[in-house]
Image (tube, grey):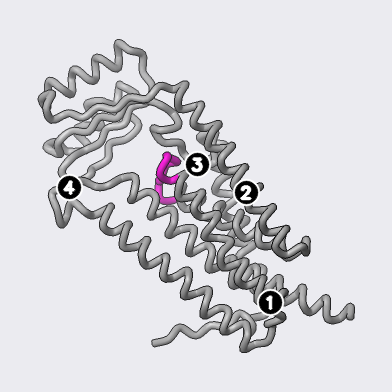
Amino acid sequence: MKFEFNPYNMDTKKMIRIPLVILVICIGILCSFLVMYGTPVRLGYDFTGGTVITVPSTKDVGYLEEKYQAYDLLFVRDMGSRTMLQFGPMDPDREKEVRDSIIQEYGVENVQLDYSGATFGKDLQHLAIIAIVISFVLMAIVVFVAFRIPLPSFMVILCAVSDIIMAMAMMDIFGIELTLGSLAALLMLIGYSVDTDILLTNKVLKEKKNTKDDFKRIFDTGFTMTTTTLAAVVVMFIVSTFSYLFTSYTQITILSEMSAVLIFGLLADLLNTWLLNAGFLRLYIDKRGRKR
């Protein structure tokens, strides 16, 4: 059955109010995590440093948590045929002690170790902030050059920011840490977010397509664009997250995290583009028409 929706049929103020309320709730979630953890999203191994050890899944997760909790164990994650143990930064003697204990229990050939220093993690944090800021600045420049109208251009940027904030809030809710994979997904969302917003704004303002039928056609095009991408990302999430159920491979963590963040962001984009941005454009057109 064909999905029927037309932003033109909704009450304009309600269209704007719904995503703004959700945005405020998401900002509240990020602020609460900032108070609790010092960052709006929990930082993963890539940004904090530490030791990651993966072993065959022959022991219960609870057993591993209890045995190694004295070694700054951050979490234990079941990845199908293997189990990942992530430890925070430790001094060399403690790190060697826990490594030797695990190797003795599982055998050196079955243990995979990965280590990252805390200083390197802090450097990555700074680089991540710079990358996000530069991405938003360049995106804002392109949008303002394309439309040359301050308020509609600002709304395109606001929708992109809202998509990122909502995706980050969902990361907190579902326990997804900020890693290099999830950071890459957030940067990708900047591009995905502005696609449909630029489509809508360009059609309405530059091509003067602002009737009820025009909004329906624009929505059908944009909705198809987003849901096509969303379908591909959902498949990637299922395959990377549950690959161990169908094959001998373990969970592909980086692809699982990236696809999950993209799903959150694309769903947020549907909300922000076709309610927040569409509602604002209708108000903007009506106000401009009354002035004329």
Q: Secondary structure at mark 2?
A: helix
Q: CA distance from mark 3 to mark 2?
A: 19 Å
Q: CA distance from mark 1 to mark 4?
A: 49 Å
Q: CA distance from mark 3 to mark 4?
A: 29 Å
Q: Nearer the viewer, mark 1 or mark 4?
A: 1
Q: Nearer the viewer, mark 1 or mark 3?
A: 1
Relative depth, front residue between 79 and 226: 226
Residue at screen point 66% across, 62% down: 156
Labelled pair 1, 3 in contact (Cβ < 8 Å): no
Amino acid under disc 4: Tyr
Give the mark nearer the N terminus: 3 vs 2: 3
**Does the magenta stretch mainly form a helix, a strand or a loop?**
loop
Residue at screen point 29% across, 30% down: 52
- The image position of residue 121, as x and y in percent, is 45, 27
Q: What residue did someone put label 2 on?
A: 136
Give the mark nearer the N terminus: 1 vs 4: 1
Q: What residue did someone put label 4 on?
A: 249
Q: What residue did someone put label 3 on?
A: 41
- The image position of residue 54, as x and y in percent, is 22, 33
Residue at screen point 14% across, 53% down: 247
Q: Is residue 112 left or right of residue 188?
A: left
Give the mark nearer the N terminus: 1 vs 2: 2
Q: Secondary structure at mark 3?
A: loop
Instruction: State the quadrant of the C terminus.
Output: bottom right
Q: CA distance from mark 1 to mark 3?
A: 36 Å
Q: Nearer the viewer, mark 3 or mark 2?
A: 2
Highlighted magenta segment, given as a residue range: 173-182
